Amino acid sequence: MAIPAQSIIRRAVETLQDTTSVRWPVSELVRYLNDGQREVVLYRPDSMVTNATVTCVAGTKQTLPASGAKLIEVIRNAAATSAKKSVRMINREILDAQTPGWHNIAGSVDILHFMYDPRDPKTFYVYPPATTSAQLDIVYAAYPTDILEPADGALYTAVTGNISLPDIYGNAILDYILYRAYMKDSEYAGNAQRAQAHYAAFN
């Protein structure tokens, strides 16, 4: 079940004892919420896991859809002519050593292997090179959709939309918002410790 962003912002302003949103404007808290969603996906890509069928471009180099943040797995061929054959991950260094010219061999609709480097999270390579008829079923982590910031001076009731993450991450996002809010006022006694406590809870 999706959680309304408004309910999380409401809990934040109540915890901060700033229900009129004077010290921490609602638009600022919404920015913290959006940052928190992205932070969760950074550490837990499976929080925004997405299954999709993608059509390959010609060649070995493939990229995720625009909404993709990080590849998790390539499952199988999806083209009607490929009989849903599985695709296995292999080490690119082995292929480079054994068949240095593998990027230039004839293309195929049937993909046998994929290669992925987490240092380049939105790109993966396939063997043999794909034709434009090749399709793959993949799993990837998607970017969360930002909640629209309300106008300056608005109350929490002006916040609309649901968070992108599953409801189990609602408390983690709240802790992230409170961490950022208390860091803003860390010069006041106790707030630095409160900020670190909420960040620890978020982690």
Image: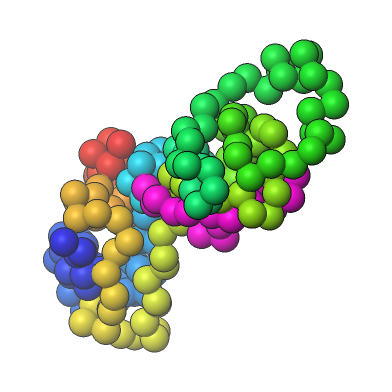
Q: What sort of colour scheme is used for the picture?
A: rainbow
Q: Nearer the viewer, residue 161 or 52?
A: 52
Q: Which residues are magenta?
A: 49-68
Q: 126 above or below 81? A: above
Q: Position of residue 111 (x, y in %)?
A: 60, 37
Q: Residue at x 30, y 85 (%)?
A: 154
- How many numbered marks are there? 0
Picture quarter with the C terminus: top left
Q: Tell me, yes or no, if residue 119 can be seen here.
A: no
Q: Position of residue 142 (x, y in %)?
A: 45, 53
Q: Position of residue 39 (x, y in %)?
A: 41, 47
Q: Is residue 107 left or right of residue 28?
A: right
Q: Nearer the viewer, residue 181 or 122?
A: 122
Q: 152 above or below 23? A: below
Magenta residue check for 152: no
Q: Residue at x 29, y 64 (%)?
A: 163
Q: Residue at x 40, y 77 (%)?
A: 149
Q: Position of residue 40 (x, y in %)?
A: 37, 46
Picture quarter with the N terminus: bottom left
Q: 181 above or below 87? A: below
Q: Is residue 96 left or right of residue 130?
A: right
Q: Is residue 10 left or right of residue 162?
A: left
Q: For residue 44, which quarter of the picture?
A: top left
Magenta residue check for 52: yes
Q: Residue at x 51, y 59 (%)?
A: 67
